[in-house]
Amino acid sequence: MSFKPSAAGLPESPDHTRAACDNCDWAGTVSQVAEIKQPDQRLEPGSEIPVGECPKCGALAYLVADVRYHVWLHLERQDGDDYCDVATPDCLGTFADEAAARQFIISLLQRYNPSMVETSDHFEKQDTDTQ
């Protein structure tokens, strides 16, 4: 008996939804995993459901959470040394990588406050690992 969970309901198509092995260094897509052999012996009720078997070592493979970057508008009031939220933060955008999120912030500043972009290197990514 074998078992492969349906890819229906996943956020992206199986060809692009990322998966990784729980045992070795394999990482790929859901479409690359094999059916789970002997699921009744390998799966426990209430545990995370794997997407299939690793094509490299045969261990269970699971979905990989996609990393997303969110740019938020956060408005607060300073009262002495205390800061208080004025309103619930609003998400201005969601991006697949940090560079795209930073570019979005820079484009907003260039549009609404260009002098801040010209006088600040705050939005340039600092590479502290190599220093």
Image (cartoon, rainbow, N blue to C red):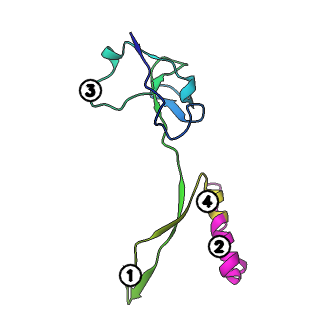
Q: Which residue is mark 2?
A: 108
- Callout in the foreground (4, 1): 1
Q: CA distance from mark 4 to mark 2?
A: 26 Å
Which of the two discs, 4 and 2, labels the residue nearer the N terminus? 2
Kindly indicate the quadrant of the structure image that contains residue 118: bottom right
- Where in the figure is residue 98, as x and y percent of width and height? 61, 57
Q: Which residue is mark 4?
A: 128
Q: Is residue 10 above or below residue 101?
A: above
Q: Which residues are magenta?
A: 104-131
- Where in the figure is residue 111, as x and y percent of width and height? 69, 77
Q: CA distance from mark 3 to mark 4?
A: 44 Å
- Circle 4 sits in a helix, a strand or a loop, which is it? loop
- Callout in the foreground (1, 2): 2
Which of the two discs, 3 and 4, labels the residue nearer the N terminus? 3
Cβ–Cβ under 8 Å for marks 1 and 2: no
Q: CA distance from mark 1 to mark 2?
A: 24 Å
Q: CA distance from mark 3 to mark 1?
A: 46 Å
Q: Which residue is mark 3?
A: 45
- Where in the figure is residue 74, as x and y percent of width and height? 47, 74
Q: Amino acid at mark 4?
A: Thr
Q: CA distance from mark 2 to mark 3?
A: 49 Å
